[in-house]
Amino acid sequence: MIDFKAIAELSEELFLDYSRLISSTAVSLDSVQIDKLVSRGCSSANWNLVKFTAQSDLDLVKNCSFDGAVSVHIPGGMLQGSSFKNCTIEGPLTVVYTGGIVSMTLLPGSKVEYCGTIRWNSAPGALNAFINAGVETGQRRVPVVPHFDHTDVAFLGSAPGRPVIAKAVSIREKLRDRLKGFIGRNACVSSCSCILNTVVMKDAVIDNATAVRGSILFEGASAVDGALVRNSVLQWNSRVDSLAVVENSIVGECATVEKHGKLTDSFLGADSVLGEGEVTASVVGPLTGIHHQSLLIAAWWPGGRGNIGYGANIGSNHTSRLPDQEIRPGTGMFFGLSTSVKYPADFSRSPFTVIATGLTTLPQRVSFPFSLITLPHKRPHGVPDGWYRLIPGWVLYQNLYSVLRNQWKYGKRLKAVHTAVDTSVFSDEILEMVRDAKHILEHSSSYSIPEAGKNYITEEDRLKGIEIYRKCLRATELWKKNKTGILSSGETGELLDLVRYARTAVLSSREKDYKRGDRTIDDYLEVRKPMEEEDFIKALEAWFAKAEADLKT
């Protein structure tokens, strides 16, 4: 459930108590002060509405126009070559050569340079926007609330969350009624032609963006180098740059949209990266990598931590009747190059599963964690066309390197501090899925297993899957007991064997890359570090050595 009270309290940080601004003590100018400003190239249609504080230094103001009610406190910095209408200016700050600043409050330390129009007409359009959290046609529509995280949006997009949508709408209505336009302390706004109905919070940056309209930039957020941001929220230290487009969306804490990437009607989770690709009508969890030209549409993926390869189409949400189909990827899923996924599809109980390059998967539900879906070497008799081979648990014994490297990588890459992010690969929830998958395999004997979807499992793969799932469950069970110090001597030896098994599996899975590369590319090894010098391998070897030493004592 969502803690709406906490969300409402967090929203309070977007409110400013303007009565406490020093500029509130500003008074009308006398004739000598007006003459001085006019001599410095300043003008006003009605100087009676223009007020300065006693601490202001008029020598810092040059070639500016003032229209309507303008209050100024400028003890330091500069106002030059700019136009102000119905504004509050709270220095020290710098504003130079900006065409028109209308109905905004500028806070100390801010810098505004070489912009066109910065105007506030009404509350940001973001507070009227909706995220289509998993269905393009709106059945999972969720209101944009600035402080929502991936779990909030995912919950409201699901059936249990629909009844409390009204509470989210109420929070943002109150915010919309109270919010005013401002450029926050130490924020920097430069070389942008249009900033409309946008809140720029402390330390945020808009630099050479195409335009920013109807949006809220949290502390440290940035829109730079051709970015176009409309009706969206950029949370703490998030970034939109290099001609990326974000519309009706939330960019999560420390997340990035870059290199022409497009984020529409979606939530992009903390510390995720969307570059070149397109994400539409989706909720994407943290630490997800979408670095190449690809499509993700109508996805409910709160677990995140996955990867989408170049050319992947995830996927076919349009039946030619309506674009109302959807997908649920599992946590940590890897979609290979040029994969094409037909909808509806549910892989939510297949975390850390790999779909191999070039596959076109059929509509289905798959419930086998840590698996590989791949082309068959030889299709068994009776298996329908279009079905692929599913190898349960393959990632755990053929690619354990990737699993443990991901665990290590998440810890190093996670920068979010305001957003709770679970980086555990072997969480209780995922282990429960492993347990269920093992049970299914133990009680199945045919190629056609309903939980395998439109894929088949060979007898050899079924037995291997049972074995590796058992190892996984037993290793995690013993490791938890080890942490509490209640292992028997026999269990200690068993866990030691499993630790050694894991080490061998990790190293052998990485060695395959080196051996294959060496066979194929003449100088492959010469231009690469030896495997044992990789940062991850060194860290992992140190962990294995310590674990083995502890278990031997």
Image (cartoon, rainbow, N blue to C red):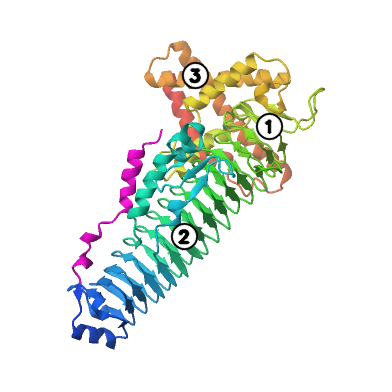
Label 1 – label 3 distance at C-alpha: 30 Å
Q: Secondary structure at mark 3?
A: helix
Q: Is residue 412 left or right of residue 506?
A: left
Q: Residue 361 location in percent, x, y? A: 70, 35
Nearer the observer, disc 1 or disc 2?
A: 2
User: Is residue 479 something that shows in the picture?
Assistant: yes
Q: Residue 540 location in percent, x, y? A: 50, 34
Nearer the observer, disc 1 or disc 3?
A: 1
Amino acid marked by disc 1: Ile
Q: Secondary structure at mark 1?
A: strand
Name the disc covering residue 255, or none.
none
Amino acid marked by disc 3: Leu
Nearer the observer, disc 2 or disc 3?
A: 2
The picture quadrant where one finds residue 417 is top left
Query: Closer to the N terminus: mark 1 or mark 2?
Result: 2
The N terminus lies in quadrant: top left
- Span shown in magenta: 1-26
Q: Residue 506 location in percent, x, y? A: 57, 31
Vertically, is 454 above or below 496?
Answer: below
Q: Which residue is labeled 3 in the image?
A: 495
Amino acid marked by disc 2: Ala
Q: Are marks 2 and 3 in contact (CB under 8 Å)?
A: no
Q: Which residue is found at the position 17% from the left and 74% from the top?
A: 54
Q: Are marks 1 and 3 in contact (CB under 8 Å)?
A: no
User: Is residue 238 something that shows in the picture?
Assistant: no
Vertically, is 166 above or below 46?
Answer: above
Q: Nearer the viewer, residue 328 or 473?
A: 328
Q: Is residue 372 left or right of residue 435?
A: right
Q: Which residue is labeled 1 in the image?
A: 373
